[in-house]
Image (spheres, rainbow, N blue to C red):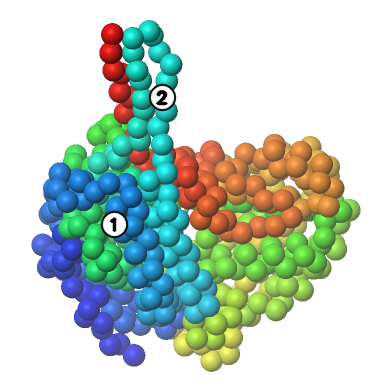
Amino acid sequence: MTEVTKSTAQGVFIDNQWIASKSGKTIDVVAPAEGVVFAEIAAGNAQDVDAAVAAARAALAGDWGRLSATERGRLLSKFGLKITEHAEELAQLESRDTGKPLTQARNDMVATARYFEFYGGAADKVHGDTIPFMPGYFVTTEHVPHGVTGHIIPWNYPAQMFGRTVGPALAMGNACVVKPAEDACLTPLRLAELAATVGFPKGAINIVPGLGEEAGDALANHPGIDFISFTGSPEVGTLIQTAAAKNHIGVTMELGGKSPHVVFADADIPAAAKVIATSMVQNSGQTCSAGSRVLIEASAFDAVVAALAEEFGKLTAGTPEMDGPLGPVINATQKKRIEGFFERAEASGVPVLAQGKVADGVPEGGFFVAPRIYGPVPRKNELATQEVFGPVLAVLRFEDEEDAVRLANDTDYGLMAAVWSLDGNRALRVSRQIRAGQVYINAFGAGGGIELPFGGMKKSGHGREKGFAALHDASTIRTTIFKHG
Ligand code: NAD
């Protein structure tokens, strides 16, 4: 199967229309479940980025910049409804592009629509302060847009990432230039097109697909952008922050994770095991907020491992249409990278505790990986410290509360965590000592809800997305000092 969907190769989307990329080049889009090219996208270049930034700048001075917060909110809400109307089409596109099971792609579209619904409602509810100052003065603050915002997003949740970063930026009145990931970006391209149909003025949302080192680099270094929001790997995050430092602009960095589940002996073990297993393989483990380390109190180690092994034994990777708990990983490189972790773990004597399957009848060229649990993993082994971005759990043992906290904090990352214990006091006490942007107690949701501030501590990044916190990061403050005598 090698049909190419030409509609996805129309170019770059600037000023509400498709324009041929100045590069004249395209990038093949491979379906991860099949390993075949099924579409192509434009390979946007620096000139395309220039045009997109100029369009966004003009939008700020034009119709988009003149809208009130309420009017912006209405547009966002209408866009949310439009996404819901097109949810099935978008889910089909997303699952072919990323390989994710259809139910998951459908859930992702519900979340994508919800970003615009949430930020549509929030747009006119971000208020400033009045500040007591010297006699004869009246001082107020207001949240104003940064201006032109750049958004560089990854391939793992293309539609959701678009909603997560662009939703709050638009709500606050910024004009956006988006560089989606070359590995999966068909839904962001379609979303930009759908946004134009609900009435976003031209230049408010521009999207330049292309390679990271070309279009992404051009956007990150562009002197015409006022803020950049990046989600991706820590290595590229460093490049983006270096570029931002040269241009003296602010950034939001959503980077990787190695998030721990801390399981005490008094936890509801079957409930914990089910949540830990299913959330770990969501998106084939290619989720920054995956709970990929399970830290288990020594006295319950065997019981928790047995419960996890039972859950992992039920997991089968399959095609989007098989609609099981997980699909393939994104590409051949990622599959090889994950298998490299497996080989090195085994070479260093770390045992496989349980393994799922790849379904019979999946296409031979698909990038499928059977989920695995390794353990006990030595504390400094790469499986305990590095982000694998695949369907693999590392289990480790801890002795007591103090040891649990030390171990939970013993990586460079600090994105998410969960504490499992039916002793509420202990669960809360431990959770408050973990350096992570989101900590669940007796539950876990990779990434959490749209209402909940999300982001990293330590090398997982800085700045917050989701919730009202994202609106603050997507804007800056102007203080007006009025001397009235
Ligand atoms: P990546 O950093 O390679 O790519 C992310 C984006 O950056 C893509 O659009 C890519 O084209 C672009 N890019 C690549 N090189 C660039 C360059 N030199 N200049 C500018 N842009 C460039 O990451 P990835 O492999 O696509 O995604 C996986 C990583 O993303 C993982 O580390 C994961 O944890 C992280 N992630 C984090 C979150 C979060 O919210 N914290 C969410 C999803 C993914």
**Residue denoted by label 1:** 179
Within 10 Å of the Cα at label 2, are there few (<14), some (14-19), or many (20+) other Cα atoms? few
**Is 98 placed above or below 229 here?**
below
Residue 466 in percent (x, y) is at 48, 50
Q: Residue at x 28, y 13 (%)?
A: 483
The answer to whether the beta carbon of the residue marked 2 is less than 8 Å from any atom of ligand 1 is no
Extreme residue toward the right, this view:
299
Three-letter amino acid code of the residue under disc 1: Lys
- Tell me which label, 1 or 2, sits earlier in the chain: 2
Q: Nearer the viewer, residue 193 or 351?
A: 193
Q: Quadrant of residue 214?
A: bottom left
Residue 99 in percent (x, y) is at 45, 76
Marks 1 and 2: CB-CB under 8 Å? Answer: no
Residue 120 in percent (x, y) is at 39, 55
Res 140 visible = yes
Q: Residue at x 24, y 44 (%)?
A: 148
Residue 427 in percent (x, y) is at 77, 45
**Is 111 placed above or below 72 here?**
below
Q: Between tags 1 and 2, which lies in front?
A: 2
Residue 262 as seen in the image, left or right of residue 445: right
**Residue denoted by label 2:** 130
Mark 1–mark 2 distance (CA, rounded to whole Å)? 38 Å
The answer to whether the beta carbon of the residue marked 1 is less than 8 Å from any atom of ligand 1 is yes
Three-letter amino acid code of the residue under disc 2: Thr
**Viewport quadrant of the N terminus:** bottom left
Q: Ligand 1 sits in which quadrant?
A: bottom left
SS under mark 1: strand
**Is 442 placed above or below 354 here?**
above
Extreme residue toward the front, this view:
485
Q: Residue at x 67, y 40 (%)?
A: 434
**Viewport quadrant of the C terminus:** top left
Q: Quadrant of residue 93?
A: bottom left
